Image (cartoon, grey):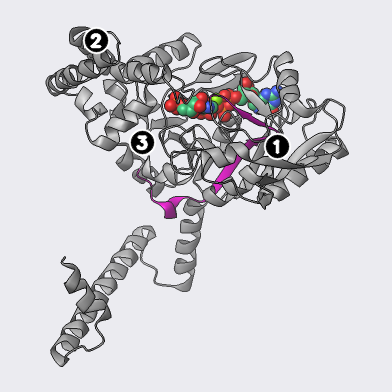
Amino acid sequence: MPTSAVGKLSVSPTRTAAESREKEQELKKESRKTQNLLRGDLANLSFVGKPSTLLAKCWEIFCLFLISMANTILIGMQWGDEGKGKIIDVLTAQADIVVRSQGGNNAGHTVIHRGVKYVLHLIPSGILRRGKICVIGNGVVVDPVALVAEIDGLHKLGIKIDKNLFISSCAHLVLPYHRILDEQRELRRGRIGTTKRGIGPAYGDKAARTGLRMSDLMQPIVFSKKLQAKIIENNRILQALGAKPISFREVNESYLAAGENLRPFVANTVVYLHRAIERGKKILFEGAQGTFLDIDHGTYPYVTSSNTTAGGACTGTGVPPHRMDRVVGVMKAYSTRVGEGALPTEDAQLTQRLHSLGREFGATTGRKRRCGWFDAVATRYAGMINGTDELAITNLDGLDHVDPIRVCVAYRLNGKRLDVPPCDACQLANCEPVYEEVRGWNTSTRAARTFSKLPAAARKYLRYISELTGAKLSMVSVGPARGETIVL
Ligand code: GDP
Ligand code: IMO
Ligand code: MG
């Protein structure tokens, strides 16, 4: 629309009579449209029966309430590896469906059950519980070869995967040239410290509208044709970077074979999820990575390439915001980060202590995680972005013999106190934490199964960091196993 036309409708102070009539008619049309929309909504409501009496109306509202209390988004409140896998596994007991909405096999979610350690990368952690359905949503980037390997690995551990997994036909594919490009970029200045799984380049292709999707892989002729063009283009880039070109024939063969393996799982997951919601099924949206690795809200450029925050659960699955009922934020009792980028509360002594206990090694790459004190500036901001209703605090036992314990309550930058993290990476790197010290508890918390069984100092610490974050504490984890959990 030309700008002058916009100006005429909205700001012209001297409207003619004809223009006024036109405007009035436009408004009437709009109002009719709104009424039709509302009628449409009421028609949708009548799926539980036409409300003829007050009782029926109440029942209808109650049914909607039951359905609307069903869906939970679980997200990481820090820099990833908060213990989401463990909490998902616990919460799956109350869910029917567990859905991944973003990220790819950069994620590593650890679940320990009956002494067996499972590390999930692409498959939702809910797969470990019998009778639960798992969905890989449209927002996930899927490396089909890695996914087949993950399915095979789980089979070997006795986990059945057949009718309990769906993969969105709209999910984008990670291809070998994505991985090599990722590796090549990591050799150069300005490295991010990625997992080298090709995640950034795959999302790059998606945003550039040049990506291949699961639906392409399901049509071998279409896939091969598109792949050939992509490999010709990417081989030029790889050669310019000094990397070896890749063979179309080899990639084509291995991807088509993986595609055939995955064919039974590929579906329109949007329709599946919406029908499930209509039938009152409870859905758990499994976040990967953490708030400060979010492409928009994280410590850019030291982030991953997807929306790891609560909004990503909607775009990455096609389930609208009004169907989401609660957001559970998972955070460690301290902070960790793997890869480059600022971690304002990083502490060498705490890092060494946790590593010497055999803790804080990456689940995907095995890299040592950097460790630091609990950062309430970060988690408060994460609470804001995600609308966190409830908190699950993990790894409390990591602080069992640490005394005193420091908590970052603000940052100081150029002599000024900050209560929210700055957007700029250099500024964040220059922030100095303002600490408060609290008493440690100097005893093991591993055996506690109720909140009251925790030492008083641990209870005080948990309440303190929840209050600083601004959400209700609902779960505490005192060990990696399913049972080592306190539900409040
Ligand atoms: P995720 O990516 O958020 O699922 O987390 P990871 O699995 O990558 O990393 C969390 C690590 O902490 C894993 O090794 C878990 O087994 C472990 N873990 C989770 N909760 C607890 C806990 O409360 N105590 C201990 N000791 N380990 C925990
Ligand atoms: P889960 O789901 C921790 C980090 C990488 C790197 C940055 C970009 O297990 O919490 P990428 O490979 O995504 O391009 O890397 O993000 N990263 C994670 N850190 N946990 C993860 O996942 C991560 N996934 C990516 O270390 O700094
Ligand atoms: Mg992890």
Tell me which amino acid carries mark 3. Gly
Q: Which residues are magenta?
A: 318-339
Tell me which amino acid carries mark 2. Pro
Question: Where 32 sits versus 382, above or below?
Answer: below
> Does the magenta portion include 323?
yes
Tell me which amino acid carries mark 1. Phe
Image disc number at residue 139: 3
Indicate the position of residue 377 as horizontal and vertical percent values.
65, 46
Quadrant holding the N terminus: bottom left
The residue pinned by badge 1 equals: 374
Residue at disc 2, CB closer than 8 Å to ligand 2: no
Between disc 3 and disc 2, whose residue precedes?
Answer: 3
Image disc number at residue 245: 2
Between disc 1 and disc 3, whose residue precedes?
Answer: 3
Q: Is residue 60 left or right of residue 382?
A: left
Q: Secondary structure at mark 2?
A: loop
Ligand 3 found in image quarter: top right
